[in-house]
Amino acid sequence: MKLSIVLSLQPTRFASLTYQGKTEDYFQKIKTLGYDGVELAIRDPSLLDWNHLEESIKTSGLKVPAIGTGQAYIEEGLRFSSPSHEIRKRAIERIKLQILLAKRFQAGVIIGLIRGKVQGNEDLRRGFHWMIESLNACCEAAEKEGVFLWVEPLNRYEINLINTVEEGLGLLNQVGSENLGLLPDTFHMNIEEPIIEDSFRKARPYYNHVHIADSNRWPPGFGHIDFKSILQVLRETLFEGFLSVECLPKPDADEASERAIKFLRGIV
Amino acid sequence: MKLSIVLSLQPTRFASLTYQGKTEDYFQKIKTLGYDGVELAIRDPSLLDWNHLEESIKTSGLKVPAIGTGQAYIEEGLRFSSPSHEIRKRAIERIKLQILLAKRFQAGVIIGLIRGKVQGNEDLRRGFHWMIESLNACCEAAEKEGVFLWVEPLNRYEINLINTVEEGLGLLNQVGSENLGLLPDTFHMNIEEPIIEDSFRKARPYYNHVHIADSNRWPPGFGHIDFKSILQVLRETLFEGFLSVECLPKPDADEASERAIKFLRGIV
């Protein structure tokens, strides 16, 4: 199976990224460790030199299977579910830009935290409605560009719109775009899914990219998730996408990326 | 093994309680379902009629193994780690009152959310120091009354002081009171402990009460925690306390309490 690891191209307060920093030198390091790809976490694509980025990636020999977008929520508060028309509009524009960048790499665009947490004083159903409306606008752009959007279910503490794979499948049904899929993440699944393996089976073929972190969000092998059993399910269901490591930089960033690929290569 | 279930005696925004409401009629219901005890979640003991409560408990034939105290944080913001001397003082006074009530039932007093989350603009080490200071004051009162205080490690999203059993053991060491113990909770352990069974072993004999909820905080049997394996460890390490169900009221409060005891009686 193909392996990638998340790299943040802009500083962020989100600690669940193995590397942080703007240096493309990391690309070579990741390649040397044996990864096939690098997943990019990008707050604002307009701040990047796209041609330079493309060149660096090409030089490294890595693929870019996916682009993560949640930093725009964490750092700027942009979200699909906001009661503010202006904030929703900016969130949609941001994702549309991510779609254009993703097109260059034939990468998927991750719809995770950008959905946003509906606040205590807001109406949850109204927030859900706005999320759908924003998603529809992005799907239209994605279809036009031939890019895929992947909705990542996140655990209840991080978001209150789409926590489980089942809710994710319901959302796909409701939106009805062929360019919309899911992105299961083992850390979140350990909290939200009754039986992780069952959820992986149920969600096929609606995902082609999987986030890997152990139960404590450390690299795989540091917690109690049964990755052997999960990989067995992925093989049985003919999964051909990337397993993408998105974990805390624990014990530190270097060791996390080394331990993760060593562990995964041992079982894939 | 003895089984109990959490009952909130005052309205709360904390949903992880199988029943909510002030009616002592629930005691009989819980007894009829086959539970040996009822764990009371109490925001402010001064608002209760202690004699009436004691009488109702006696009539029901239930034990009260523990008193939960986190509502004072959720509803009133009282916490051990606050930079405000006044808030810390009120939190300590509240726990001292809980100790006096607990003495009537020979119950343990739970030190969970009352530790409080250190806020982003506060210093974490300073918050830790204040938590210890507050805990010391409460331990003194607990020793005098012959009551036990149990520090419950909670997952990273709920608190940033004592998330793991290991951190809990370090705290016991630092405080050094014979009346201070731990309270492992399977829901939180699923997120924070590398191997749940190992942590149960490591923490013996520093706990005599265990919170039970499945990985998704539903009743045991609805998620993927291996309770058989955990109970095997508890038996091997001669655990004689209560398994206390603290889960979401899912599918609803009645079914949760029925399904939980049915599941647990099937494996204890």
Image: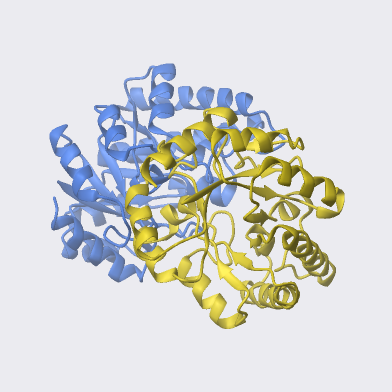
Chain colours: A blue, B yellow
**Residue under the point 22% across and 64% down:** A28
Q: Which residue is drawn at 50% across and 71% down?
A: B206
- At which x and y percent is residue B113? 65, 58
Using the image, determine if residue B48 lies above or below residue B116. above
**Residue A152 place in picture, x, y as percent:** 40, 38
Which of the 4 quarters of the picture holds residue A266? Answer: bottom left
Q: Is residue B160 above or below residue B11?
A: below
Residue B46: x and y in percent read 86, 54
Q: Is residue B267 above or below residue B183?
A: above
Q: Determine whether, in the image, residue A5 is placed left or right of residue B255.
A: left
Q: Using residue B259 as the reference point, say whether residue A177 is left or right of it.
A: left
Give me the residue at 58% from left, 48% from top.
Answer: A76
Residue nearest the observer in this picture, A68 or A241:
A241
Q: Where is residue A229 in the image (x, y as percent from the top left)?
A: 20, 45
Q: Which residue is drawn at 23% across and 66% down?
A: A258
Question: Left of B9 or right of it: where is A181?
Answer: left
